[in-house]
Amino acid sequence: MQNATVIVVRIVVGVVGAIVVLRTLLSAIRTVVLPRAQKAWLTRFHFVMVLQVFRLFARPSRPFDERDRIMALYAPIGLVLLPAVWLLLIITGFAGIYWAIHDETLSESFVLSGSSATTLGFSRPEHDWVTGLSFVEAAIGLGVVALMISYLPTIYGAFARREALVGMLEVRTGRPASAGMLFARYEQIGRLEWIEEDLFVRWEQWFTDVEESHTSQPALVFFRSPHPERSWINAAGLVLDTAALRASAVDIPRDARTDLMIRTGFLALRRLADYFDMPYDPNPTPGDPISVTRAEFDVALGELEAAGLPIKADRDQAWLDFAGWRVNYDTVLIQLARLVMAPPANWITDRGEQPRYVPPLTFPSIDRARARRRERNETSSRDD
């Protein structure tokens, strides 16, 4: 009876070990190889737990410069630790398999598994079929390390593309950055009529690239700019607000490229919000409230007027048009800024005291149910 119980326990441990190995491999493939925004629960759990540790040290009571230095290490350390987590789980899973299929103790199975996964070879199994399984584990261990090595250049290539345009924006806006200053610079150099081609077309392409890279490689969201005052999410908000003011309040001929950039931008931010399970209204109406007040809007128009830009006579309609554009990205912009702990920025991080956002931990089945619910809601809204 006791032998039968031991056999059952070994079988269960072996099955659980095989599941751990398969799930870990699937997580690595989804994180590194799969070119789409598919959530890997294990990777998400890892980054959320590391984020919680970092936020213990980057408390809101500390000066922003100190918090920025701490959070600048979060994404790199999270990436470096990720293959170690994968390797540890693979070693643990194979240890369970070895213990289930041969007569060694559990500690000896762990030693054999660690020796195989790290290809150190200091422990060798006695049976040929166990040796074959250890070769499989060694190949998997090497494969995980190779995947991570190939993953890092992709990460830093996307980061460099993102930051190139963010850095160029500072040349056009100065500090502190504002839509009024951006318009004033273009007016001063006589290129206001070229703002669509010089700025909005390039940022439409930037939003497309960020949506693809930051949803398939979500660690990029947390990579901070080389300069503490810069932030990719603040730059995105500034350009969107500039385009919204251009479309609603500046009295120059309408250009469809402005509208296309705004739509590309808020769709990209929504895709990122979907990945991190951020709540927002997918079908807002122009009359819905936004975080920017009418008084702040009037101040911005005053800055534009002082810079010599022509402003539309009907300011009430201009406000309604601006709010109608801003409502599409207002909620997701502010939540993403909270998620990455963005530096101070006008109309983004100055919207009052907000709790820092932490992505929820969910299982894949729950994620799929949420996605189906969201699709049904969007379909019913379109039908209405």
Image (cartoon, rainbow, N blue to C red):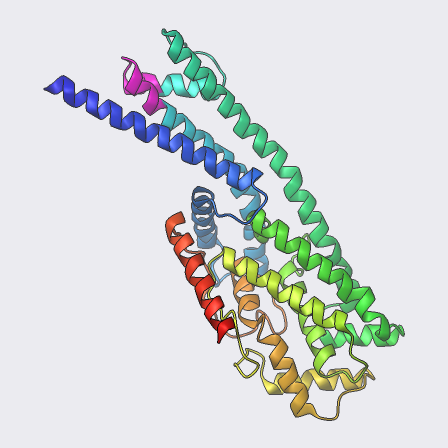
Residue 293 percent across, percent down from the top left? 58, 83
Residues shaded magenta: 95-109
Relative to 98, residue 365 above or below: below
Name the residue at 68% across, 53% down.
209
Q: Is residue 363 visible?
A: no
Viewed as shown, does residue 338 lie left or right of 370?
right
Q: Is residue 23 visible?
A: yes
Q: Which residue reaches farthest right?
A: 190
Q: How many marks?
A: 0
User: In what quadrant of the picture does the N terminus appear?
Assistant: top left
Residue 335 percent across, percent down from the top left? 52, 65
Dividing the picture into quarters, in which one does residue 122 lie? Answer: top left
Relative to 17, residue 272 above or below: below
Relative to 264, residue 129 above or below: above
User: 135 and 117: which one is in front?
Assistant: 135
**Residue 114 on the magenta segment:** no
Name the residue at 30% across, 25% down.
14
| Magenta stretch, overall SS | helix
Dividing the picture into quarters, in which one does residue 77 lie? Answer: top right
Name the residue at 63% across, 51% down.
212
**Residue 97 on the magenta segment:** yes
Residue 343 percent across, percent down from the top left? 60, 63
Q: Which residue reaches farthest left?
A: 1
Residue 199 percent across, percent down from the top left? 78, 65
Dividing the picture into quarters, in which one does residue 103 lie? Answer: top left
Viewed as shown, does residue 316 lie left or right of 143?
right
Viewed as shown, does residue 230 lie left or right of 283?
right
User: 53 and 62: which one is in front?
Assistant: 53
User: 328 and 138: which one is in front?
Assistant: 328
